[in-house]
Amino acid sequence: MRRFLYSFVLVLTALHVKAANNVLSYIYDLGSKTAEVTFDKDSKGDRIYYSGHIVIPDVVMFSDEEYMVTGIQPKAFMDNVGVTSVIIGNNVRFIGGDAFNGCTGITSISIPASVDSIGEWAFSNTGLTEVRFEDCDNPVRLWDWGGFCVFSSSPLETVYLGRNYISGARPFKGIQTLKTVCLGGFVDSLPGSDFEDCSNLEQIYSYLEIPPVCGPKVFNGVVKQTCRLYVPDSGIELYKVAYAWNEFFNIESGIDTILTDRESGIANGIRFNIDGRRLDTIGHGMNIISTEDGKAVKVFER
């Protein structure tokens, strides 16, 4: 039987640096030398709330030993409206249900490749406008319950999917604020009602030359006359005949190259968005870059 020990410790990164003056609470598994972030209560029985910038580290120190931080327990940060940003460590494998539900101060989140399970309502009722699933060849499980998904009632505008996922068939269904979807190179299937009734979706970027296999309702309710689909030049004819993708009126050969290193080569050129407006900062999705030799190159930013 596993032995668990509850304790309070200072939040430490792998370099043993305190994170944002917050004190996180952990549950420690003494056998496997792993830890999970949880919530705690004060002496009066009231819940302790975190605030500001939160770093969930790769490891924490306890009794002079390293413990790998592998999970975020259900409701760990629920209703922590003072939390403004979160970095999730690269050893976290699961995010429990309601973990960040009600965190209205969080506007963006990056899900590391290590995460293979996210519980129902984990990021519901937040301030999230952008979510990014890092590239990975293993799928992530997105749990839902009663028609409510991981991101229910959060004002998502941009989603970057760098990996396949398993879900109850409707992970982003009906999110009316959603405008941009980017599908990375490991996304080869959209099996359910993934983006059904996302009627304000404006643009989809798909990295794969071969179109991802789609379920029957994946784009139901998306206005295909106006939503633009950008694909690699070499794949445009394939998308025009592929099931579900062939319903889009505007399929454009819009990706000349894929950037992963933003500090090298073409990334240093002057960039514009797809409508011709000059960009001061690097953004995900499609960019038009004016290079030093006078060429204009369409680039997909991961």
Image: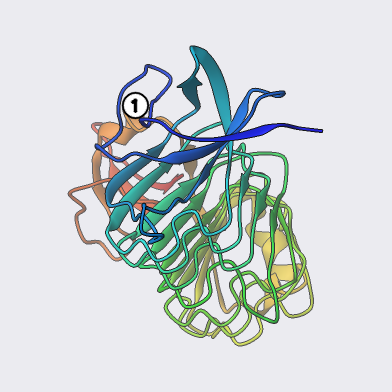
Label 1 neighbourhood size at 10 Å, few (<14), some (14-19), many (20+)? Answer: few
The colour scheme of the drawn protein is rainbow
Q: How far from the left and from the top, in percent, is residue 302?
A: 46, 44
Image quarter of residue 93:
top right
Tell me the SS state at disc 1. Answer: helix
The correct choice, above or below, for 93 with respect to 239 in the image is above
| 244 over 79 or under it: above or below | below
Quadrant the N terminus occupies:
top right
Of 85 and 50, nearer the camera is 50
Q: Is residue 202 left or right of residue 138?
A: left
Give amino acid for label 1: Gly
Q: Residue at x 47, y 78 (%)?
A: 153
Q: Residue at x 51, y 79 (%)?
A: 175
Asked whether 286 or 15 is in front, the reply is: 15
| Figure label count | 1
Q: Is residue 285 at all visible to an observer of this figure?
A: no
Position in image of residue 162 (x %, y %): 58, 47
In the displayed structure, does residue 255 sit left or right of residue 187?
Answer: left
| Rendered location of residue 67, percent (x, y) | 56, 23
From the viewer's side, name the closer residue of 250 and 143: 143
Of all residues shown, which one is farthest toward the right? 1
Q: Quadrant of residue 103?
A: bottom left
Which residue is identified by label 1? 265
